[in-house]
Image (cartoon, helix red, strand yellow):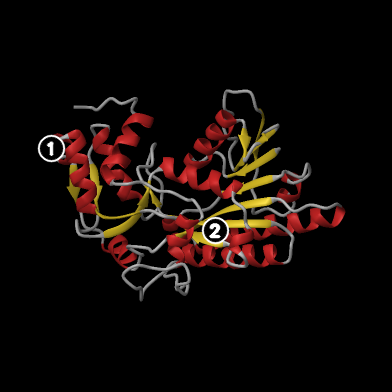
Amino acid sequence: MHILIIGAAGMIGQKLATALVANENVGGHPIDRLTLADIVPPPTIAGPVSQQSLAVDLSQPGTADTLLADHPDLIFHLAAVVSGEAEADFDKGYRINLDGTRHLLEAIRRAGRQQPYCPRLVFTSSIAVFGEPLPPAIPDDQIHTPLTSYGTQKAICELLLADYSRRGFLDGVGIRLPTITVRPGKPNKAASGFFSGILREPLNGQEAILPVDDNVRHWFASPRAAIGFLLHAAEIDTGPLGQRRNLTMPGLSATVADEIAALERIAGPRATALIRRQPDETIARMVAGWPQNFDARRASELGFTADIGFDDIVRAHVEDELNGVLPF
């Protein structure tokens, strides 16, 4: 099996590549080759699987055709400009998030004209496709009313994925990821970045800025859960999906206060004392229109599983990124 990961230099991409190399198979099919692609060369992963690292720009015409030259069996499309950046730079957001995805879908369709070809395509969407007004728990069939350019771009791509799957050009599965917390590394330009920052920075002994109220509620999943979602989406029987190819992933509905309480239970009050409250009206306004809770039973019934509580999310970060060592 040949697997292509687009967006492989990002946090999720690197963790996914690591998991694939460790597993050496997907759904019982041995992985013969792994192509890692991103705007910068992704790091290769030590292990038995043959790997190729490519620096490419999917938004440029012709790039997708090059990536598909060897007809990968399984494609993970993770590449995107994050929410805050897509809002700040309208043209860049549409060029990368929408045009890049359309280039990929069209390249798959063209490849299928030359020989029989219908790869599994796992696409990472977002809960940002939903916006107010919203019910207390959002079902899968909730109408898309995105309130950001990022959410709009993801919603359009969901429709394209479903239509290209309906036409038989590819076998698509779209997974709407919760906000992934705790994200390791440096802060990115995502408007939701503070959800990770108020945990990650104190766990590194550093100050964190909290731009919203403690009572803000949101929908979360850990990086471990996100990798589980991707691997399961790659293996799942898509027959039961029918024409509804996009799924909201299960997650954890929690408040900022719940995050802080979990941090204090695990790392103590010296960690939570590093959180500095600095209101930001722009971020607060964006977050106010985001979903807070979901009824993700459809994905759960199909075997997708999520985290139990925020203590587990914090502990996973300490184990995976800090070698189990706290700064205090």
Task: Please give left or right for residue 66 compared with residue 158 in the image.
Answer: right
Quarter of the rendering occupied by the N terminus: top right
Amino acid on which disc 1 is placed: Pro
> Circle 1 sits in a helix, a strand or a loop, which is it?
helix
Question: From this viewpoint, is residue 100 visible?
Answer: no
Q: Position of residue 305 (x, y in %)?
A: 43, 48
The residue wearing badge 1 is 269
- Relative image position of residue 126 (x, y in whole percent): 47, 58
Taking the spot 58% from the left edge, 38% from the top edge, the residue there is: 40
* Real-space Cα separation, disc 1 to disc 2, in angstroms: 41 Å
Residue at 35% across, 52% down = 220
- Element at label 2: helix
The image quarter in which residue 198 lies: top left
- The residue lying at 80 percent from left, 53 percent from top is 111
Residue 182 horizontal/vertical position (percent): 35, 42
Are the residues at dot 1 and dot 2 in contact (C-beta closer than 8 Å)? Answer: no
Q: Nearer the viewer, residue 209 or 263?
A: 263
Indicate which disc residue 92 carries: 2
In the displayed structure image, the side of residue 266 where residue 322 appears, left or right: right
Query: Can you tell which of label 1 and label 2 is closer to the viewer?
Result: 1
In the figure, 209 relative to 269: above or below? Answer: below
Mark 1 or mark 2: which comes first in sequence?
A: 2
